[in-house]
Amino acid sequence: MTSVNWLEETEKRKDELLAAVREFLQIKSVLDPATARDGAPFGEGIRRALDYALKVCADAGMTVKDVGGYAAHAEFGEGEELIGILSHVDVVPEGDGWSSPPYAAEIVDGKIVARGAIDDKGPAMAAIFAAKIVKELGLPLSKRVRLIFGTDEESNWQCVKTYFQTEEMPTMGFTPDADFPLIYAEKGLTDLTLTQTADAYAAQQRPPAARPDAKLLALSAGLRMNMVPDKAEATLEPLAMTGEELAERYRAYLRDTGLSGEADVRGGQVLLRMEGVSVHAMDPSKGVNAGTELLHFLAGLELDERARQFARFTDRYLHRQHYGEAIGIAHDDEEMGPLTLNTGVIRYEADGDAVFGVNIRYPHSQPFERWRAILEERLAEAAFSLEVVEHLKPHRVDPQHPLVTTLQRVYTEQTGQEAEIIAIGGATYGRSLVVGVAFGPLFPGRPDSAHQRDEHIRVDDLIKATAIYAQAIYELAK
């Protein structure tokens, strides 16, 4: 181990680091197709965030390169081999209910509170400052170090796909976008669109409902497949029941279940709203899916026949089915854990399409081809088709690889704690590398606020993570 006191070196730069992190977080870098252009394929906010990260790197004397706004990198050091540190500058939408403005980046009770604080702009800046420390100390390196910045990690990963079409694959590396001590294995990840078109429904030739309580005109829930929906809304046309009867039945349901929502009767229609709890799709059981909870209520009504099929299909196969049990694809794995299923987006139009956006994460022992065939069989029961929007295969690095053992040693030396290796259901940039792992910044025992309201990172954890990353970069590249 080098004699450098990495924590002390980080503390010397604390004020500069905090100022840079806060300024970085104050840029709203959410996917915005409306402002997309050449050089900014995912919108102006993400472009500004990328420019800010590159400026900090350039000011530190690193060589920077922009790859069409899809991604960029900053590099220093010499040698044939390349150490990569991958982070991303985009964030998920902020949502509602924050106790402080989501882009103010205020420091509250020792925490920086902002969208992106822990996922992933705070850690990205920690990695930049870690590299700055190594560079400023003038330590001899035998390898090059490259900080790679992606721009649509929260969407479809087109950033790294485009980047690695032309840019060098690192020899090995890590992403500061998950948990400490170290994540060496990640489940496979799929984003699926399940669609029942109006024509596909009609082709079933189902008889109309005899005397429905109401007709479901529209329903909407969720923003992203990788988030549990925290809001849902349905519009109904009263038929056998009056609008007030429908609204009161819903209010009674909310009282009985303890769920949150409201009902309004307007212009001859009934508007139902449901509130849930949004969490990351890697563990959907920790949230409350507003969309499937609302459809669970609707499944108990006598609706028009198409809505009845839609609601009851949802209720049978997707409501509180976090592991795919009812649909027949549940599987647990000793190393990687269980298959998980999240219904992140729901859209229904009475005269249009009925659509589910589903995120499924699966262990290597339950191959994609096996569970896809089972899922398609169930979907056919209600004339739904399946489209694979995104598919990332399971990823694993040998626990004895020098990348793993070096990072374990660094973590132990910096924290005094054993560095156990873990497998997760999340998808990190670690899998974008042939040999890549996820390394922090969330310390054991800390609550994970990623994708939630009041997302935050503790200031002392940010400082500690920066020191760990600085030593890690040096040890890997020396």
Image (cartoon, rainbow, N blue to C red):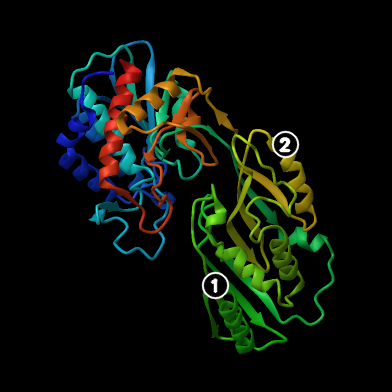
Q: Amino acid at mark 1?
A: Leu
**In contact (CB < 8 Å): disc 2 and disc 1:** no
In the picture, measured across the screen, residue 117 lies left or right of residue 183, that is left
In the picture, measured across the screen, residue 448 lies left or right of residue 102, that is right
Q: Which residue is mark 1?
A: 259
Indicate the quadrant where residue 241 lies. Answer: bottom right
The quarter of the picture where the N terminus appears is top left
Tell me if I can see residue 413 in this picture: yes
Residue at 37% x, 24% y: name it: 409
Residues under labels 2 and 1: Cα distance? Answer: 37 Å
Number of dots carrying numbers: 2
**Looking at the picture, does residue 403 appear above or below residue 142?**
below
Q: Which residue is mark 2?
A: 369
Residue 209 at x, y percent in the picture: 80, 76
**Looking at the picture, does residue 299 appear above or below residue 339?**
below
Q: Which mark is residue 452?
A: none
**Looking at the picture, does residue 20 appear above or below residue 324?**
above
